[in-house]
Amino acid sequence: MEEKFIWAPWRSEYILGKKEKGCIFCNRIRRRQDSRDLIVYRGKRIFVIMNKFPYNSGHVMVVPKRHIKSLESMTTEESAEFLELIKLTTRVLRMTLNPQSFNLGMNLGHGSGAGVPGHIHMHIVPRWNEDTSFMPVISKTRVVSFDLGMIYDMLKKGFDLVCPEQKSRPKRN
């Protein structure tokens, strides 16, 4: 089988960059630099952050603000807000990016492939019928077509529209 290559220079920052200490989610929620950290929504107990190295355009994660290792450690209030924010996020993604479907998933623990095994989070990945083009099907290569800044602006506006109380929270830096 012929070896295949794809040019993805944006990944070099992740691969070669200095690995940060501590939990990336806890670090991001404390910094309050939402546009830099790609946080598109801050709820009372839960927030929504874009994946900096997405599987697909619009890939976001819904994350508890509190450092929580397992679902059973969530309070009733956190669980309720977590599910409501998953629903709200799919609504905003549908409204702003018009995907035909979604993949939702959690990897709980290191053995499951969790990139951040100590802090639970739900991945929401928008999908379009065109996702099944030759690139992912034949060459096993995903193409992310939109700039993260552009998607950030679209999602931020979507959350501001759906949740007017969000407008009083930090804006893009």
Image (tube, rainbow, N blue to C red):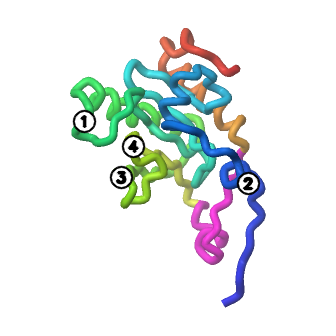
User: Which is more N-terminal, label 1 or label 3?
Assistant: 1
Relative to 93, is 109 above or below? below
Q: CA distance from mark 1 to mark 2?
A: 35 Å
Relative to 84, is 114 above or below? below
- Write the residue at 66% across / 27% down: 35
- Write the residue at 52% across / 22% down: 30
Numbered label attached to residue 73 = 1
Q: Which residues are magenta?
A: 130-146
Return the residue at label 2.
Answer: 12
Return the residue at label 3.
Answer: 109
Q: Is residue 173 visible?
A: yes
Numbered label attached to residue 118 = 4
Viewer-nearest of labels 1 and 4? 4
- Write the residue at 40% across / 40% down: 119
- Residue type, mark 4 in image: Gly
Name the image quarter holding residue 66: top left
Query: Pointers 3 and 4 in contact (CB under 8 A)?
Result: no
Indicate the quadrant containing the N terminus: top left, top right, bottom left or bottom right. Answer: bottom right
- Residue type, mark 2 in image: Ser
Name the image quarter holding residue 136: bottom right
- Under circle 4, the secondary element is loop
Residue 145 at x, y percent in the picture: 70, 52
User: Which is more N-terminal, label 4 or label 1?
Assistant: 1
Nearer to us in this view, 1 or 27: 27
User: Residue 117 magenta-drawn?
Assistant: no
Q: CA distance from mark 3 to mark 4?
A: 7 Å
Q: Which residue extends farthest top?
A: 168
Relative to 50, is 115 above or below? below
User: Which is more N-terminal, label 2 or label 1?
Assistant: 2
- Under circle 1, the secondary element is helix
- Residue type, mark 3 in image: Gly
Circle 2 packing at 10 Å, graded few (<14), some (14-19), many (20+), is few
